[in-house]
């Protein structure tokens, strides 16, 4: 991967961005894409829009979106001893949280903390077999009491899991937040590649880093309404099935390093799918397929039904260990997704071609 692109990816992953608290990551996204865009704006929700204008009049509007928000925690209550009780922001697995290091994002800056747990030596057999509910778990920041904790932390402060960008074997990397900063990265790279080509396409391109996807596709909904696209491509992550404990019957045969995934189903415009498939064949980009018979739980869903409807596609990055601090992907799959989307954009002729015949 290009050195500057990899540095951007690491910086994006490092920036905290639980749903509703995305701006540290959005600032990283804005700084990176600014040189590639004719126009760069942020709306009241916090969605970021990078626009590259096309050549011609009455051009189709094409929107590519990835969401920048990640799962996390939020401080709900501080007890008399200075321990912080919390709630989940998005789908947090209560199995995983005890014993984790965290960062509490307080007004004065991040505070280190740990999620405590009763020692196994003090637990009876029944307790050892029971998952402690999130509402009963707590964060220890080392405060002496409630008063000391309140000088540092406010109710409502966001919390993220401590996680570093880790190089594994080959081009595999692990970090928290690949869901869906992987998508944001691909959006940014599409903007970069289009700008670097020097060619004006017969379309207006909007690259969007959306917010609050993990709590209800909220930023995707408002950004689609704002742009009113004719064509939309959502870039997301999807469950890899090449790890030992995942059933392929659930999500098909999906592996890291074998290319981005194209979804098929009710959420996907058939012609846009074929454009992406043809682009992959022409450019010799390896791809995989999954079936999505219902609406997807992604920004592609709200994009498709925005206003009078949008021709929508879903390009996904294979991901292991979703919603953990060690989400794992292949860097090659990210690069393949960006190349695939750029190649497909070059094939778009008009908005009318996506209307079913």
Image: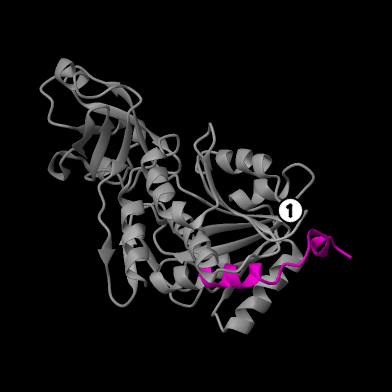
Residue at 55% across, 80% down: 285
Taking the view exactly as shown, the residue that stands out farthest to the right is 357
Residue at 66% across, 44% down: 227
Q: Nearer the viewer, residue 99 or 197?
A: 197
Q: Which residue is identified by label 1?
A: 230
Residue 328: image location, x then y, percent: 37, 64
**Residue range of the region highlighted in magenta in the rendering:** 337-357
Q: Dot 1: within a 10 Å radius of its alpha carbon, few (fewer than 14), some, or many (20 or more) residues? A: many
Q: Quadrant of residue 224?
A: top right
Q: Nearer the viewer, residue 357 or 229?
A: 229
Q: In this view of the protein, can residue 258 be seen by the observer?
A: yes
As for residue 350 lying within the magenta part, the answer is yes
Assign the C terminus to one quadrant of the image. bottom right
Is residue 308 placed above or below 196 in the rendered structure?
above
Residue 115: image location, x then y, percent: 23, 38
The majority secondary structure of the magenta stretch comes to helix
């Amino acid at each position: 991967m290009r050195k500057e692109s990899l540095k951007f990816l690491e910086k994006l992953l490092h920036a905290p961005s639980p749903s509703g608290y995305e701006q540290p990551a959005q600032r990283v996204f804005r700084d990176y894409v600014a040189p590639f865009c004719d126009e760069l704006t942020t709306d009241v929700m916090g969605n970021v829009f990078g626009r590259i204008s096309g050549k011609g009049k009455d051009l189709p509007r094409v929107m590519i979106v990835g969401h920048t928000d990640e799962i996390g925690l939020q401080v709900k209550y501080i007890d008399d001893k200075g321990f912080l009780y919390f709630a989940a922001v998005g789908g947090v697995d209560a199995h995983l949280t005890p014993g984790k290091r965290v960062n509490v994002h307080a007004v004065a800056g991040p505070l280190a903390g740990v999620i405590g747990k009763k020692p196994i030596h003090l637990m009876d057999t029944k307790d050892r077999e029971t998952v402690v509910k999130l509402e009963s778990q707590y964060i220890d920041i080392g405060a002496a009491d409630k008063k000391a904790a309140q000088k540092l932390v406010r109710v409502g402060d966001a919390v993220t899991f401590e996680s570093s960008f880790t190089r594994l074997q080959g081009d595999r990397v692990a970090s928290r937040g690949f869901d869906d900063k992987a998508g944001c990265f691909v959006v940014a790279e599409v903007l970069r590649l289009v700008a670097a080509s020097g060619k004006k396409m017969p379309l207006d391109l909007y690259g969007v880093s959306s917010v609050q996807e993990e709590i209800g596709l909220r930023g995707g909904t408002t950004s689609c309404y704002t742009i009113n696209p004719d064509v939309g491509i959502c870039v997301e992550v999807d469950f890899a099935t090449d790890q030992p404990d995942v059933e392929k019957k659930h999500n098909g045969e999906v592996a890291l390093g074998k290319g981005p995934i194209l979804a098929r189903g009710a959420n996907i415009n058939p012609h846009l799918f074929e454009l992406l498939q043809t682009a992959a064949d022409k450019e010799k980009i390896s791809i995989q397929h999954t079936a999505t018979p219902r609406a997807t739980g992604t920004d592609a869903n709200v994009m498709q039904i925005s206003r009078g409807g949008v021709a929508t596609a879903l390009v996904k990055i294979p991901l292991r260990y979703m919603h953990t601090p060690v989400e794992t992907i292949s860097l090659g799959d990210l690069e393949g997704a960006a190349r695939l989307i750029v190649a497909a954009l070059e094939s778009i002729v008009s908005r009318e071609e996506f209307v079913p015949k």
